[in-house]
């Protein structure tokens, strides 16, 4: 398991919510259950929402099943599996009121994944408002209906590198077997938020995003 923890400055939303990127970690072993221990989730608060973007690679017919954060069952806010059924991206979240670190546990159904990456964000409140799924094209984009101040989390899993426009890249992993997982965030400035993604090719693109308000 490899980690690259990079904390960003908090982004303050007009609604009073703050979104902060916390960490990235990945595991290149074949597993049906991945446990990413003691991930940073910021200061404890009754309304704190933890968002986890997950990028994984597996055989066709295998899918991501559940996500728990500090023992709390997370909701899969949006899921994208590319046409070949191999690359999958999920953005999940849960209100986790206690602790400053949490184990993030990801399970699969139908067999084992061959590698898995997570990126972790903390919001001081809010809930999922709108979602978007990227077309499997190069370039591609995510267009979300938003209100000014919504906090947007986006992620892409592909077999090629990823370049973002309209969002701040927070991680971009390159793993064995030519799997690339990248995550980014943005604060909406109006009624529509467009995030452009240049994956450098059309192979195995699974991209999606969520606006939290």
Image: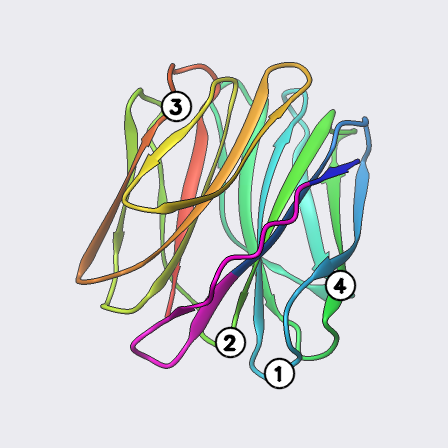
Q: Is residue 212 magenta?
A: no
Which residue does the numbered mark 2 point to in the structure image?
124
Which residue does the numbered mark 3 point to in the structure image?
199
Which residue does the numbered mark 1 point to in the structure image?
45
* 120 sits left or right of 79 in the view: right
- Foreground residue among 9 and 92: 9
Which residue does the numbered mark 4 point to in the structure image?
102
- The answer for how far apart the CA atoms under marks 2 and 1 are is 7 Å
At 74% across and 66% down in the image, what residue appears? Answer: 101
- The answer for how far apart the CA atoms under marks 2 and 4 are is 16 Å
The mark that comes first in sequence, 2 or 3, is: 2
The mark that comes first in sequence, 4 or 3, is: 4
Where does the N terminus fall, quadrant-wise?
A: top right
Magenta residues?
A: 4-20
Dot 4 surroundings within 10 Å: few (below 14), some, or many (20 or more)? many
Residue 29, image x, y percentages: 81, 27
Dot 3 surroundings within 10 Å: few (below 14), some, or many (20 or more)? many
The mark that comes first in sequence, 2 or 4, is: 4
At 70% across and 50% down in the image, what residue appears? Answer: 66
Q: Is residue 7 magenta?
A: yes
The mark that comes first in sequence, 2 or 1, is: 1
- Tag 2–tag 4 contact (CB < 8 Å): no
At 68% across and 45% down in the image, what residue appears? Answer: 65
- The answer for how far apart the CA atoms under marks 2 and 3 are is 31 Å
Determine the secondary structure under disc 1. loop
Where does the C terminus fall, quadrant-wise?
A: bottom left
- Tag 2–tag 1 contact (CB < 8 Å): yes
- Foreground residue among 191 and 60: 191
Determine the secondary structure under disc 2. loop
Residue 43, image x, y percentages: 64, 76
């Amino acid at each position: 398991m490899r980690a690259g923890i990079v904390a960003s400055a908090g982004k303050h939303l007009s609604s009073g919510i703050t979104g902060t990127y916390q960490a990235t970690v990945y595991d290149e072993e074949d597993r049906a259950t991945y446990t990413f221990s003691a991930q940073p989730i910021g200061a404890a608060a009754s309304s704190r929402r933890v968002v986890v973007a997950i990028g994984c690679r597996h055989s066709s017919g295998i899918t991501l099943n559940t996500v728990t954060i500090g023992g709390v069952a997370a909701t899969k806010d949006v899921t994208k599996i590319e046409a070949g059924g191999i690359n999958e991206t999920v953005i999940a979240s849960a209100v986790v009121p206690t602790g400053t670190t949490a184990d993030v546990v990801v399970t699969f159904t139908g067999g084992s994944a061959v590698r898995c990456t997570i990126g972790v964000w903390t919001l001081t409140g809010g809930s999922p408002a709108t979602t978007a799924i990227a077309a499997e094209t190069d370039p591609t984009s995510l267009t979300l209906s938003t209100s000014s101040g919504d906090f947007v989390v986006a992620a892409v899993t592909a077999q090629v590198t990823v370049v973002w426009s309209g969002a701040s890249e927070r991680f971009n992993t390159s793993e064995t077997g030519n799997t690339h997982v990248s995550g980014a965030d943005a604060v909406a400035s109006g009624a529509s938020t467009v995030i452009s993604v240049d994956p450098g090719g059309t192979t195995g693109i699974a991209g999606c995003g969520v606006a939290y308000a």
